[in-house]
């Protein structure tokens, strides 16, 4: 039995692990997980206490006797709530808190402070757009000069995360500019109308 198991592991290493490593599967898999985490930070609500982290459920979290899961802040501030695992549930719990706090902060800002915040968000958006454009160019240059294909694929795969971050900060700037905070369907309209494209204004 031990010999059979050893032979099976050896075969898996030879015919699966080695070919996948040649094609850069580990890098691609790591980037894919990073992308999933990045999407979660956009979809999941921000912590209403510290504003630095986002609320999430640990992969190995177990529900309590009421089938509720612990949502905690990724920023480590200690804030947490119990609710269902779905994002709709955590949004319903936190939306009133976040809306109240966000509107109070925005209303308390002077016009000059709001303008500065919009410019800051816009700068971050443009920076990530530049990085998103550079990634395929660098990947193509690397392939043209004889670099390994997995390296080029790894660099190319970063285009999407940078694009997501660019859209995120563009959306934040639009929210401050228009006062559209936590309105259901606002992000969908923002994307459909092409307001995420640099230079497009409402």
Image (cartoon, rainbow, N blue to C red):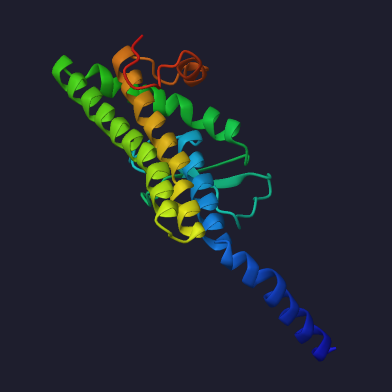
Residue 29 to residue 186: above or below: below
Residue at the image point whose x is 47% and y is 26% from the top: 95
Residue 173 % position (x, y): 31, 23
Residue 48 % position (x, y): 38, 35
Residue 143 % position (x, y): 45, 53
Residue at the image point whose x is 72% and y is 82% from the top: 10
Depth check, front residue: 52 or 79:
52
Residue 17 to residue 142: above or below: below
Q: Quadrant of the N terminus?
A: bottom right
Residue 73 visible somewhere in the drawing: no
Depth check, front residue: 149 or 112:
149
In which quadrant of the rendered view does residue 16 lie? bottom right
In which quadrant of the rendered view does residue 7 lie? bottom right
Residue 160 % position (x, y): 47, 39
Depth check, front residue: 82 or 42:
42
Depth check, front residue: 61 or 152:
152
Residue at the image point whose x is 44% and y is 35% from the top: 164
Judged left or right of residue 13, residue 114 is left
Q: Quadrant of the C terminus?
A: top left
Q: Residue furthest top?
A: 202
Residue 18 visible somewhere in the drawing: yes
Judged left or right of residue 47, residue 119 is left
């Amino acid at each position: 039995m031990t010999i059979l198991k050893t032979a099976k592991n050896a075969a898996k290493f030879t015919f699966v692990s080695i070919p996948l490593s040649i094609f850069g599967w580990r890098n691609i898999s790591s980037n894919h997980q990073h992308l999933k985490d990045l999407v979660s930070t956009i979809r999941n609500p921000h912590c209403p206490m510290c504003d630095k982290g986002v609320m999430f459920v640990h992969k190995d979290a177990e529900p309590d006797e009421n089938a509720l899961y612990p949502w905690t802040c990724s920023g480590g501030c200690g804030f947490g709530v119990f609710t269902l695992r779905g994002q709709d549930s955590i949004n319903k719990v936190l939306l009133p808190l976040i809306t109240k706090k966000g509107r109070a902060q925005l209303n308390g800002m002077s016009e000059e402070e709001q303008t500065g915040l919009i410019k800051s968000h816009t700068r971050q958006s443009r920076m990530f757009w530049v990085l998103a454009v550079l990634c395929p160019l660098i990947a193509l240059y690397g392939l043209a000069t004889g670099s390994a294909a997995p390296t080029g694929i790894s660099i190319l795969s970063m285009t999407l995360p940078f694009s997501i971050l660019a859209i995120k900060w563009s959306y934040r700037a639009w929210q401050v500019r228009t006062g559209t905070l936590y309105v259901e369907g606002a992000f969908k309209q923002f994307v459909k109308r092409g307001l995420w494209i640099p230079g497009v204004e409402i």
